[in-house]
Image (cartoon, grey):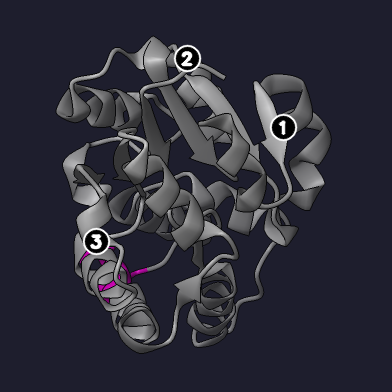
Amino acid sequence: MDFKAAIFDLDGTLLDSMDVWEQVDVDFLRRRGLDVPAGYGDAMRARGLEEAAIYTKRLFGLPDSVERIAGEWLAMVRDAYANHVELMPGARELLTHYKTCSVKLAAATCSARELVEPCLRRLGIWDLFDAVCTAESVSRGKEFPDIFLLAASLLGVPPELCAAFDDVLPAIRSAKAAGMQAVAVFEPHSALHRPALEALADRCILTLHEALAWV
């Protein structure tokens, strides 16, 4: 692969946090006497916090405001991000290697900045990023290429010279729509979409260690 910048998703790609959000889905809906329907988690993963709250409110006909739903979710995961969420295997090594090789680095995540910044600082990788784009940075989630294009713009690198690493099918589709080289990072929560990811992405990897040899 030929790229000058790498744009990384966080949840499920660099951060081992998907179990946290899966439990939030269960607990949030259980409080309201509801079960998690099939496909709900997949529908949520490409959406920013506000988009996800709007989707959930409409799907279940909840009386809660969008702000209240999003606030409840943040309260449920804040401690986990601040104190418990860890890096995926190979994440630190890959980021450090790319940084040493003068590859520009950005994070592009649907999570809120108030969650990811303390987490990345605690894990000692915040300063490796040249740009961090969060849910507040764009008005639409990863079903659209906006956040990838913003990251490329902030890095000052043309999209065609960016590699976008993500574990979610709509995000890989959007990275391709942005004109980027898309790298699908497989993890358990994306297993269902593995054939589609393999068909769409430019490269597919089981671990981040595999991408060390690309630069």
Is 65 covered by the magenta stretch?
yes
Secondary structure at badge 1 equals helix
Residue range highlighted in magenta: 63-71
Whether the residues at callouts 2 and 3 have beta carbons within 8 Å, the answer is: no
Name the residue at 34% across, 69% down.
Answer: 63
Q: Is residue 106 above or below residue 148?
A: below
From the top left corner, tell me how far across and down residue 173 is, in percent: 56, 24
Image quadrant assignment for residue 108: top left
Majority secondary structure of the magenta segment? helix
The answer to whether residue 210 is seen in the rendering is: yes
| Residue ID for mark 3 | 126
- Judge the density around disc 2: few (<14), some (14-19), many (≥20) Cα neighbours within 10 Å: some
| Residue ID for mark 2 | 177
The answer to whether residue 14 is seen in the rendering is: no
From the top left corner, tell me how far across and down residue 148 is, in percent: 34, 29
Q: Earlier in the sequence, mark 2 or mark 1?
A: 2
From mark 1 to mark 3, how far is it between C-alphas? 28 Å
Q: Earlier in the sequence, mark 2 or mark 3?
A: 3
Q: Nearer the viewer, residue 66 or 130?
A: 130
From mark 2 to mark 3, how far is it between C-alphas? 28 Å
Q: Nearer the viewer, residue 52 or 56?
A: 52
Amino acid tagged 3: Trp
| Residue ID for mark 1 | 197
